[in-house]
Structure formats: C-alpha cells, structure tokens
Amino acid sequence: MTDAAELRRLTEELLAAHPPATTDRLDFLRARFDAGLAWVHYPQGLGGLGAPRSLQAVVDAGLDAAGAPDNDPRRIGIGLGMAAPTVLQYGTEEQKRRLLRPLWTGEEVWCQLFSEPGAGSDLAALGTRAVRDGEEWVVNGQKVWTSSAHLARWAILIARTDPDLPKHKGITYFVCDMTDPGVEVRPLRQVTGEAEFNEVFLTDVRIPDSMRLGEVGDGWRVAQTTLNNERVAIGGSAIPREGGMIGKITATWRERPELRTHDLHQRLLGLWVEAEVARLTGVRLRQQLVAGQPGPEGAGMKLNFARLNQEISGLEVELLGEEGLLYDDWTMRRPELVDFTGRDAGYRYLRSKGNSIEGGTSEVLLNIVAERVLGLPAEPRTDKDVAWKDLAR
C-alpha cells in the first residue's frame, strides 16, 4: 500500500531525475505521469499508483515547493473533470492507454458533445443519430454550447443509435476525433463578446466502433458518470478562503472604503458567509470522493455555485456604481480557457449568467436534488416509455 512517505520519496526521485528548472515543461509532465504521480488514485500504468485519492495533496505540495510546472488544469478542465473518469470506468485497456496520458499532460484538449438545440434541458431527447456501418458508426447531427471545441482533438459524444426505444435507452456513448472529416466547428458569440462556446455540426462523421465507451444502447448510464463528475468539477472545485467570485468583491470593499454603505455591508457579509459554507461543503464533498464515485450531491454544489456567482457579481456591480457599468473590451475572442472570474466587474456579471445553464440548468438540477438527494416523489413523465421516434417534437 502506497503511503505518504513513499509518495514523498517518489516525488523527490522525479524532481532529481527531471529538475524543473532545466527540464522542458512537457517532458516533465510526461515523466510525472509515467511515475504514477499525475493522479495517484488511478491504476498503475495510467498515471497513478492505486493509492488513496487523499494522498494527491502530498505529491502536489512537494512539486509546488520545487516550482514544478502543472498541466494548466483550467485549460483542460473538460478532459480532467469529465472525460478522464468516464474513460477510466468504461474504456477498454487500449482506450485508457491511448487517451489518458496526452489528456492529462494537456497535449490533447477535450470537449463535450452532449447538448443539442432541439433538446433543450432534456438531454435524453437528443436527436443526433449514429448508424452502424460494419465496424464504424456514421454520425449526423448538431451539438451546441460546446466549450473549447475550437481547440479540441477529442470529444465525448452521445448519439441516438435506436430510435425505436424510449429516449433514455437508445443512446450510445462515443469518443469522437474532432479532426475527422465532417466535423465543423462554428463560434457562438456570447453576451461577454467572447466565443468560448461553439456549435458543432456532424455530417457523415465515421467513428470506429473501437472508440465506443460502454455497450451499445447503454450511453445514458455512461453519460451519468460524466455528468456527475462535471457538476463536481464546476461546483466543488478546490479554492482557498475568499477564492473565486467572493474574493473579487471583498478586495474592492477593503480597497475602496468610499464605496461602502451599511446596506451593502450587510448584504456582503451574508454572501461571504454563504460562500464560505459552500467552500467547506466542497471540501466535504471531495473527501467523500475518496471513498467512491461522486453522487447527486454534486448537483447541489453546482446549483449553489451558479446562484452565488450571480448574486455576488450583481452586488459587485452595484457597489461600484457608475464604474460597474463600464466594460473593458467587446472584441471578439475565442479564448483557450473558461474564466468565470476574469477581467472586470462587468465581465464577471455577464459571464455569471451562463453559470445557471452550463453543466445542467438550475431547473433540472433542482429536480435532481429533490428526487435523488431528498428522496421526494418524481415528477410525472408521460414520455418515459414512449419510443423516441414517436415523441412530439
């Protein structure tokens, strides 16, 4: 059993063999992966050592102290937080060995082809079709709100493979090569001026059956692994006290005493307490992950994340008064990472509006919390046993 002392020794050996000051960044990350120090709870040979997840902090502390480079997790968050756990749980050995190393080092960026313009918040109603042709699947359809599609090499994709079954049962999960013929990425310009999202058109895209994750028709169950991890990645990420959105407004409060009023003070105190409660709840949730897969509790964390970001950014704009109405730059950009708290107060206010949509709408997450966390009766669903092809659209 790998313990903290062993991990410290292995970390020291990695640093001695590949000094960060003189080693190419990518070479160092590859060596770290091969040493099993990328994500220590993953199996040996796949960037880990089969160690307890909680011991990752031992490795990270040693590497941080030595000034070692990281893998820029904000840039590859979809790969790390969503694709990797799904590949680990459902992928073949060949898929794991081909995909996980360049995913973790950041050599290959991932995106998520789930949402569709015709399905709205009902992901299971998706209409992108995958038809089998020998050892390949021919995929046609459209996806939307795809972060980082303009950068991605790979995509996690769910498509309908049997329209004669009810909507949750006729779905299969694939890994799609974004460089293949028939994949077209178009930018979607947002209210912030950026085009961090995209729409993706799939026209006769041929995906080998060897790039399928899970069994044919079992894609909805596989997708739940992705979605549970996505909500934890968005709502339960590790941040220090006064990190994230609350840190921006508290810094302004301390630096600009002339902006303060009693009413704003009371509201800020309330949001500060809520943000700290959310942070500590995230710590507890990550501790629960040590024992197994994330559950529906991640939906509650993501729900609270969206609400708090919107309330805090709204208060920040109000605190700044006329300054809060200014906006630094509307130039069309296609950024390389999602930045919820970047730039100025106006950007944060506008960008936070997407928090209650991305990663599952707040309305859907309320249902998940009600049914799967609180155990309340499920909403009546008259289409649950109706073949997808017979649903009204």
Image: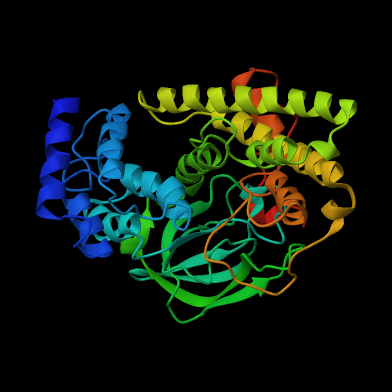
Front-most of residues 93 and 36? 36
Image coords of residue 324 (percent x, y): 83, 52
What number of labels is visible? 0
Q: Quadrant of the N terminus?
A: top left
Which one is in front, 264 or 201?
Answer: 264
From the top left corner, tell me how far across and down residue 127 is, in percent: 63, 61
| Side (left or right) of 60 relative to 344 | left
Q: 290 and 11: which one is in front? A: 11
Observer able to see residue 382? no
Colour theme: rainbow
Q: Who's the residue at 21% across and 50% down the image?
A: 32
Up the image or down, 93 lies above or below 233; here it is below
Whether residue 157 is visible: yes
- Identify which residue is drawn at 72% across, 41% down: 252
Residue pictured at 37% horizontal, 70% vertical: 136
Left or right relative to 382: residue 114: left
> Horizontal placement of 344 versus 63: left or right?
right
- Residue at the limit of the structure toward the bottom, as seen here: 181
Vertical placement of residue 388 versus 260, above or below: below
- Compared with 285, 60 (above or below) is below
Q: In the rendered image, which quarter contains the C terminus?
A: bottom right
Identified at 52% across, 52% down, the residue is: 171
User: In the image, residue 254 lies at what x, y percent?
Assistant: 71, 35
